[in-house]
Image (tube, rainbow, N blue to C red):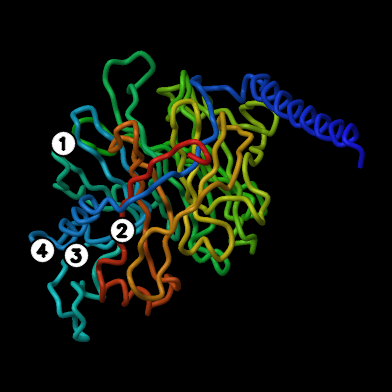
Amino acid sequence: MPDDARARRRNGTGFGLLLALVSAAVLLTALPDHDREGGGTCSARTLTSWSAEAELTREFARYGDDAGRADDWTGGDGTHSVRLPDGRVLWLFSDTYLGQVYAPPNPVGESYAWRDANAPLVRNSAIVMSRDGRLRTTLPAPVFPDPAPRQWRWPVAARVEPRSPGSGRRVVRVLLWTRTAGQAPWIYGVPTATEVATLSLPGLRLEGITTVLDQRPVADASRRVLFGTAAVDAGAWTYVFGSDDGRAAARPAGRAYVARVPRGALGEPAAWEYWDGSAWTVRGRPAPVLGDGRRTGVGSAFTVARDGGTYVLFTMAAGAAGLTTITSYWACAPAGPWHGPTRSFSPSLPDGDVAAYNPQAHPELGDGERIVLSYDVNWLDATGTTAQANLSRNVSLYRPRFVTLRLGRPGS
């Protein structure tokens, strides 16, 4: 090939690359307003490092193993938290074992602390952590009573809000997932409704529960959306994320959805707006913002955190990797577009046929440069009597574990 032809090809390639980069920059700066909600500078984010947060993991082990009381928390999953105005942290859990823990060896001679196989199991619980980071008290459980026979409530994200708009008195709003007992594949219950509970401050007494989104009219249970797996404050809004139960419908991954509520109005159903794929609407059907049901998507429980002006979503990976691996996505706004998955990591797991699930960020424990993330651990077969017996035989399995994450630009 003549030299001038080679030069033209090189120059043409370079110009094409430059044009693509300029176009991408223009596209990024020209995103619609809804893609910039929350303010701040947005840039691609990915996991750069992670390490075990051993001290916090040990604190839950210490509290769970304490035999001083027979009616407090000894294990649970669905780990969420919220810092209270006086500096305490309220920890919220879904299915929870109470009772007493006994020192090893267990009844079959293993070196694990254990609980009686008939120990009480309640659908939700809450623990209060003091300002010095020590778990102190289990609230009388269940905190949120069952709404009807064969139904129960699982607490998810929580916020401290004014009791009413403009009020100087504050309360805790706790988002709840209501589920109804069902047959396979709904072994963890059929999605039924999203509710919001109000707890008094400082006493944390339950004052009332309000239904926000009733999903019973949606005939296909795999398309019912429950909100509250994560909540992020940005500007004048609280963005509340939700998911469907796509995995129960044999999809490798579920889909993520988002709603927004004026800050301080979580307990007002009429104030909720849902992203319908093109706009925020009060009565429209929520549309997924992430998930193709195959390569991309979320577990039924995931978490979202803000890093500057960037939203970062952590979830169990799609497919078989989701039993051990946490991955992430990023976006410039809650409604997306979401990019990823980006770098994944596999947190430590105990020996045995176990799985990790329900990653949750705890921003009140971070310092602006790192994110504290919890994840739950259970047996792969977590529904039969044998699995329940194994959880009692080794109480360390059904408790949160913690890691510290650091984020940066891809390639950094």
Q: Is residue 118 left or right of residue 334?
A: left
Residue 134 at x, y = what percent?
15, 45
Distance between the alpha carbons at the discs numbered 1 and 3: 26 Å
Say whether disc 4 or disc 3 marks the residue closer to the N-terminus.
Answer: 4
Which kind of residue does numbered mark 3 sit on?
Gly
Give the camera-side residue of 129 and 40. 40
Residue assigned mark 2:
76
Query: Few, some or many C-alpha atoms within 10 Å of disc 4 (few <14, some 14-19, many ≥20)?
Result: some
Identify the residue at horizontal 20%, vertical 59% (top origin): 61
Residue assigned mark 4:
67
Say whether disc 2 or disc 1 marks the residue closer to the N-terminus.
Answer: 2
Distance between the alpha carbons at the discs numbered 4 and 3: 9 Å
Residue assigned mark 1:
131
Which mark is nearer the camera, 1 or 3?
1
Which kind of residue does numbered mark 2 sit on?
Gly
Q: Is residue 354 left or right of residue 216?
A: left
Identify the residue at horizontal 45%, vertical 60% (top origin): 150
Residue 34 at x, y = what percent?
62, 23
Quadrant hosting residue 28: top right
